[in-house]
Image (tube, rainbow, N blue to C red):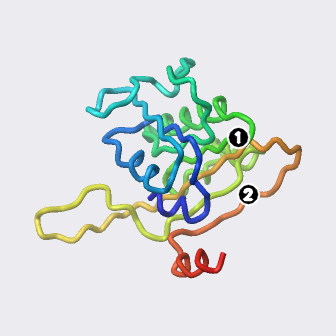
């Protein structure tokens, strides 16, 4: 999942907040991409070394560091209510030049009630549609995993420029991803 994001977003040297860290897998993947630092928090104690913090609350994290990015796979909730709360909280916490990257169902931006986060939001910059479905849990009964949901990374960037550009749709992982990076 993080590899798909890193294919289009240079995460190296960023200080990232992972506010729904769970088991810490995403935070570890972020570290492997070369992030300068990854700060973890969650609303429950998952046995990881992280701060107990409800990301959707008004409370700020205890760490003094400035974050360049907030990256997470937020809980969805009934009818997307928790995902919406994460978008709201992320946009409120996003500083100038900051990035908010949320892994959500691919069609999350299709509902007219979410237009304020996408079509009507000047900070919405891109959607990275995943070309491979995510296997959330490995099966041990001999049956091959066959996930049915499509996901995408949704990206918001708070640009210091007073210029609005149309969001882009990207795809990852690309077949030519390694070749494209080699040419850069």
SS at badge 1: helix
Identify the residue at horizontal 64%, vertical 43% (top origin).
114
Q: Nearer the viewer, residue 78 or 24?
A: 24
Q: Residue furthest top?
A: 59
**Residue 61 vs residue 111, the one in the foreground:** 61
Q: Looking at the image, which residue sits at the far right?
A: 162
Question: Measuring 18% from the left and 62% from the top, which residue is drawn there?
Answer: 139
SS under mark 2: loop
- Mark nearer the viewer, 1 or 2: 2
The residue closer to the viewer here, 147 or 24, is 24
Residue 170 pos. (x, y %): 63, 67
For the C terminus, the quadrant is bottom right
x and y percentages locating residue 25 in the rendered image: 35, 48
Crowd rating for badge 1 (residues with CA inside 10 Å; few <14, some 14–19, many 20+): few
Q: Is residue 79 above or below residue 151?
A: above
Q: Which mark is residue 116?
A: 1
In the rendered image, the vertical position of residue 98 relative to residue 139, given as above or below: above
Q: Where does the image place residue 50, in percent across and percent down from the top left?
A: 38, 30
């Amino acid at each position: 999942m993080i590899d798909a994001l890193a294919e289009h977003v240079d995460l190296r040297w960023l200080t990232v907040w992972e506010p729904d860290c769970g088991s810490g897998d995403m935070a570890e993947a972020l570290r492997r991409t070369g992030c300068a630092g990854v700060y973890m928090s969650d609303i429950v104690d998952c046995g990881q070394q992280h701060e107990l913090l409800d990301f959707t609350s008004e409370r700020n994290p205890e760490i003094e560091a400035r974050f360049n990015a907030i990256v997470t796979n937020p809980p969805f909730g009934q009818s997307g209510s928790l995902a919406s709360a994460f978008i709201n909280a992320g946009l409120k916490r996003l500083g100038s030049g900051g990035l908010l990257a949320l892994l959500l169902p691919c069609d999350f931006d299709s509902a007219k009630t979410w237009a304020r986060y996408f079509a009507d939001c000047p900070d919405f910059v891109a959607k990275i549609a995943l070309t491979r479905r995510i296997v959330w849990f490995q099966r041990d009964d001999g049956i091959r995993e066959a996930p049915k949901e499509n996901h995408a990374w949704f990206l918001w960037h708070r640009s210091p420029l007073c210029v609005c550009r149309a969001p882009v749709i990207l795809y990852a992982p690309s077949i030519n991803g390694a070749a494209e990076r080699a040419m850069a």
